Amino acid sequence: MSEAATATATTRLYPHPSLPSPWAPEPLADWLQDPAPPVIWSVAGHDSGGGAGLSADTRAAAAFGVHLCPVLAAVTAQNSQGVAAVFPLPADQVHAQLQALAQDLTPRVIKTGLLASVAAVQALCEVIDALRRDQTVLLVIDPVLGATAGGAAFCDEALLQAYREQLLPRCDLLTPNRREAERLLGLPPGSSDSPPTLAAALRELGPHAVCITGGDDASAPAQRELALDWIDVQAQDHQAQGWLALPRMPSRHHHGTGCTFATSAAAALARGFPLADALVLAKMATWCALRAGHAAGAGAGPVRAGPDFIADPSAMPVLSFGAEPLNGSTVQRWRQVLLANPTAQPVEMGLYAITEDPQRLHALAEDGYAQLQLRIKSGPGLSEAALRQAIAAAVDGMRSHPHANLWINDHWQLALQAGARALHLGQEDWSALAADQRQQILDSGVHLGISSHSLWELARARGLAPHYIACGPVWATITKDMPWRPQGLDNLAWWVRMAGRPVVAIGGITEAGRVTAARRAGAASACLVRALDQAEAAHWQAAWEAGAPAA
């Protein structure tokens, strides 16, 4: 499709994966209209009350448009008030189901729930090892070790040992709640270990990623207002740690949240999303499912997963930069972001020119660029004194251009000393700052722009309540060597809808049609780097105006 045609085409509803994946074909289809949806398996229990287990798994998989094969590992006698009995299936019956599926419906991802027996663990390990000899098969483990509503026991010490010795070494993503994490580690209930400590200890047992879900834990002050999950992802192609947060949802109908979360993560992985992005999507899907929960019986009713979560801005979480303190100011900032009106009037910032030459800023301002960024990269030939002088001269020189905003990239301390009013930082730069340095920037009152390249980076950027969030690279670029896939107009439009902040398009914007397309996708600004040398400012300004929404 030509870029002109792409610019006028209807923007896709769904995001696409941020990192290369053989499971993320182009062009992206509507997930619910996928003619060949990804296959996942769920090896879990049957809930006779229809709330959790394979019932919840099937609803969550349908919300992502994936095909779920339900493998029965146990039958439960339960209702909304508790579990009366658990009946593990004989090993040969579990094995027969797995073998039949392996011959015809091979999965991208296998998710486990209630296994109920060591024999089921052994059968699953045998089949997954055979599958992995020929293809990639990811394993998501929801360690169902007991029911929140109480009742019959699900797991004895032998089964716990099978988890530790057989399942966890094969695991890609583990999603326990706090009590399940403690049991897997042999700790007493209510141990003093923090979720980050528990997750790190569980990763030592094999999983590439651990998410300790906290929707059922409201013990800490921050958790009374926010539903907090701790994620610890140490994958080969990306790493992410932090508190994943959405407003706490007051609802008594929460049966099946753990199943919904794990299956949602498995479905997102099957669609090619990296682990950290899959956890963001799982958080969104589960939060919306909890909001739609309904009564069924006298106890806690089931959550109800549906497909609309993917385009619901109120469901977009924030993510901390590591284990930052959950103090009052952080919680307040997050709540302001999370509770903001998603239908607020969009901001228009104008074109954004990026240069490494301080001497060029005056001419760019004269040409009418509303946003200017000085991006000087440190190097062996540049002394700190020269860098300090360049930044101070740039800040001072821009005082005669009050209608243009000057953003200083990276060198925040020198910028603040020079009196700069706006900073742009990449996420690696922000991650490298100490806690007191981050607070210094947040307390300084300067405008802050933050880069983002993935769903989890978007969630992290949101947590800072920045003046804008950059989305890139929208198109392939040669100005930086990056692992990210080009976002394209579909992801740009999704960013605009979900970010809750103005979104700046950056990366590969070297043609007038791309400037126009970026604005039509809803971007508040479009960044020009190499393009500044390819045409006069009037050329780019006309392209920007051509993308303006109709009055």
Image: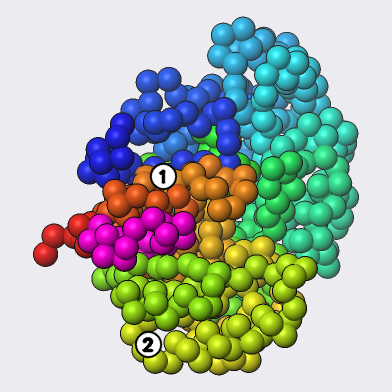
Q: Which residue is mark 2?
A: 401
Residue 311 visible in the current orientation: no
Q: Is residue 137 magenta?
A: no
Image quarter in which the C terminus is found: bottom left
In front here: 448 or 264?
A: 448
Q: Residue furthest left?
A: 551
Q: Nearer the viewer, residue 93 or 422?
A: 422
* 324 displayed left or right of 348: right
Q: Quadrant of the N terminus?
A: top left
Q: Quadrant of residue 483?
A: top right
Q: CA distance from mark 2 to mark 1?
A: 33 Å
Taking 1 as reference, is 535 above or below it? below
* Image x and y of residue 504, in percent: 41, 63
Can the viewer see residue 536? yes
Amino acid under disc 1: Gly
Q: Which residues are magenta?
A: 524-543
The residue labelled by disc 1 is 488
